[in-house]
Amino acid sequence: MKKLLMSIFLLCACMVQAQEQIRIWKGDSSTRFTTSELQFVKDGSAFIVGDSTYAPAEVDSIKVVHTVTVTWDGDQATVDLGHAPNVTYETDGGHVSILSTDTKNELEFVLQGESTQGSLTYEGPLKCKFYMNGLNLKSNRGAAIDIQCGKRINLILNPGTKNFLADSTGGEQKAAFYCKGHLEIEGSGSLTVTGNSKHAIATKEYMQLKKSTGSITVNRAISDAMHVGQYFQMNGGTITLTGQAGDGLQVEKVTLSDDVTPDPSKENNGQMFIRGGSINITAENDITKGIKVPGDLTVSGGTFIIVANGDGSRGIQVAGNMVVGEEDNTTLMQIRANGTTYEDEETEDEDRCIGIKVKGNLTVNAGTIQVSNKGKYSYGIKVDGTYTKSANATVQANVKN
């Protein structure tokens, strides 16, 4: 205990002028604080951060956190690098580019403020965290946020904050918010994204929403609202997707260099896992999908409210197998197929509006599925493979098998 306390004391003494931030882990939770917030009890048996007292035996680890803070104010942005090593930046009004060449120290970013002429581009070699702390950022050139890092990226929506992102119109960017790596979202705040050139939110590799996630809203997208590479996993939170011209929530398989062959090294490639939370999607345009999965869809909890209004649209379309259960949470799926048949003028091919379309097998072990199809010639559920329903499950729909 004495050795740990002495190490903490020396660490803070060395950085007292820097006011560097420190993160302490206790179990699965962590607390971030500056050296000025740290106090030691008189007998030296513990230390205090805010309202919390820590005994050395309770602490799993403690280390310096290199925090970069970006603040937008109108058409200008300021960057505080703290004492992050090997990090450089450039600003052009409200547009910020940050480059890290550090291969030892992970970074944490705090993004805050408001601008209608700003953006952030980040490139670095290590996983990192981005805290949205009341950010309202609209870009007039390219993406609002472009994370060019192929590692794990944690996006934290700070509790009690409302955050907004929008990209420029007519640009070549993939999305208003783009992440080259794996994106994991948490935090009870909210995020609203507008995609003015293509997707609203896009990742090259997987996306995961943790149980603590608040709400994510897309109110407009020229293409897909959320476009995810590799796989999508949702453990909690609320997703509301409307106003997209393309699909609502789409996963695509990561391919090899030929852009055709699925990459066998990518786990769960092309799959989707819904384990909790709430999904609200409106597929308004013709031949669009509320949820589109090129592989398997596994549902073990969650609430789905999906409306397919476009002709030939689908509430959920699964190219592989679909399994529905309640292993993690209660499952309720309410889907409306309101559109009618779409006919391609050139090929004369027809696509019916369908609530749930499964090319493989559909297995319903538990939960409640309610699908209505009011559109002319529409289907409730269409299964090309084998359809199986357990006695524990409730399916209220016209099923064509």
Image (cartoon, helix red, strand yellow):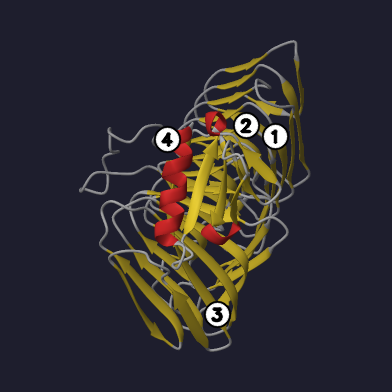
Residue 275 numbered tag: 2
Residue 116 numbered tag: none
**Mark 2 and mark 4: span between their CA atoms?**
43 Å
In this view, the residue farthest toward the top is 391
Residue 3 numbered tag: 4
Q: Nearer the viewer, residue 192 or 305?
A: 192
Q: Nearer the viewer, residue 272 or 60?
A: 60
Task: Report if the CB atoms under discs 2 and 1 are less than 8 Å apart.
Answer: yes
Tell me which numbered mark, 1 or 3, is placed earlier along the sequence. Answer: 3
> How packed is label 1: few (under 14 Cα within 10 Å), some, or many (20 or more)?
many
Q: Is residue 354 visible?
A: yes
Q: Residue, x 27% and y 58% (percent of image)? A: 102
Element at label 3: strand
At label 4, the amino acid type is Lys
At label 3, the amino acid type is Trp
Q: Residue under circle 1?
A: 302
Task: Report if the CB atoms under discs 2 and 4 are less than 8 Å apart.
Answer: no
Tell me which numbered mark, 1 or 4, is placed earlier along the sequence. Answer: 4
At label 1, the amino acid type is Gly
Tell me which numbered mark, 3 or 4, is placed earlier along the sequence. Answer: 4
**Mark 1 and mark 4: span between their CA atoms?**
47 Å
Residue 193 vs residue 24: left or right? right
Residue 373 vs residue 258: left or right? right
Element at label 1: strand
